[in-house]
Image: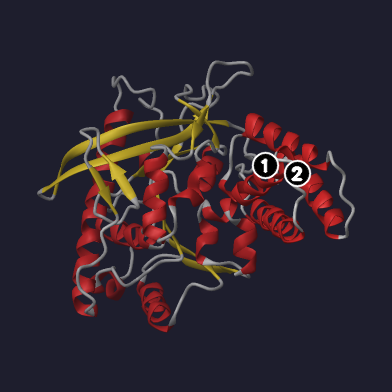
Amino acid sequence: MKAFEAAYLLPSLSVGLLSLFGYQHEFSWLLGFLGCAIQVARAGPRWQLYLAYFATAVEVLCVVSGIKVPFFVVVLCFIAFLVSSVLAFLLPVPKFPKLTGPFRVGYKEFFLSGKINGMTLQNNACVWYPADVPKGSKYVKAKWLVDGHLTGQGYARYGKVPLFLFNHLIDVRMRAYLNAPLSSESPDFVPLIFSHGMGGMRTAYTSICQELASYGYVVFVTEHNDGSAGVTRLPDGTVKFYTPPASAVTAEQKVFRNAQVQQRVAEVRLLLQYMDDCNRKGSTSEFSGKLQMDKVSIVGHSFGAATAIEAAFEEPRFNICTAMDPWLFPVSSKVIEEGLSVPLLVINTDKFHWPTNLEALHRLQDNCKKDVRSIRIKDTHHMNQGDIAIFAERVLKLV
């Protein structure tokens, strides 16, 4: 709960509680009205406080009309303030944790188009990187909801929740500075690719990507355009929301998801080509000659972990594959039975896997030809590995 919200809600709750016991003052409503006005003026309206706003309006209306506030209205107003206080506590306007690495971080957006394996591909993409950002510079921190309310709509439709639940996130900003120059403190940097999960988008794992960049990595993300993203909007205005499988039959869903994985791998390869072009000596990119492409690795979460595993199997350039809570259902049986030829790191949460997924994961690990490390983080959920763990931390603790 932010300072202006507390300054509005706590006195209103106190006055409401006193009113329940018959202690009413003719000017007590003024306290809530002023707190409400200051909160809205300084921090903007929040959906978590809608009930409190309504209660304040009722109180002001009664006083202005010269009507003594009935007891049942006092009770309802107190409940409204209480509910708003709980919602403001559980779903506060979040901030990303401070970065712990030695570098400040920059963020850029770009667009990819091309053909891979006969597929015509178009993808929004972005990159986090070590940056030079002097204090007092003109660079501003990038917004998390890169497409504003459309991004929020994508998350809402995928999660089947009302859009207003995301309204308070519209002004959340990353710790990364938009279009800041690449850091001059190192001659080159290690690049990696991050693949987002189902319903995610290119900034859905900002907390991880910008933290890695603060330690000197250059983290590229492509927003998968296979129908698995919450929403993606192309430069020509085309908007594509998450597309579920048309069939409920498991075998047909397997075909559908594996086709998506194959497109995702092609999109990863298109991103690799872009990285090569940027790194090429003589290119106009600030990454020219700065990326250690011989050390490139791939990371993914859930469906993105399936993408990372499949890509590491098909693309020999990847040095390491990191799979966070991998969903093995979309992965080709050939990949599981033959295993990877690069080291595999599996990072599992405590409450995601089920028997068939674990069985496939263990088979994959047993068949890998290089080092395999697997860790499980106790008392964690699947969504703890994405930004939702920051934005709904207190809610997740109740699950």
In the image shown, does 57 or 165 lie closer to the viewer?
57
Q: Is residue 278 left or right of residue 384?
A: left
Looking at the rendering, which quadrant does residue 145 occupy?
top left
Image: 256 above or below 78: below
Q: Residue furthest bottom?
A: 355
Q: Is residue 218 left or right of residue 78?
A: left
Q: Write the residue at 31% across / 29% down.
A: 278
Q: Write the residue at 41% across / 54% down.
A: 156
Quadrant of the image for the C terminus? bottom right
Q: Is residue 251 left or right of residue 145?
A: left
Q: Write the residue at 83% across / 51% down.
A: 14
Q: How many marks?
A: 2
Q: Which residue is mark 1?
A: 61
Q: Position of residue 391 (x, y in %)?
A: 57, 51
Q: Residues within 10 Å of mark 2 (few under 14, many from 20)?
A: some
Q: Which residue is mark 2?
A: 6
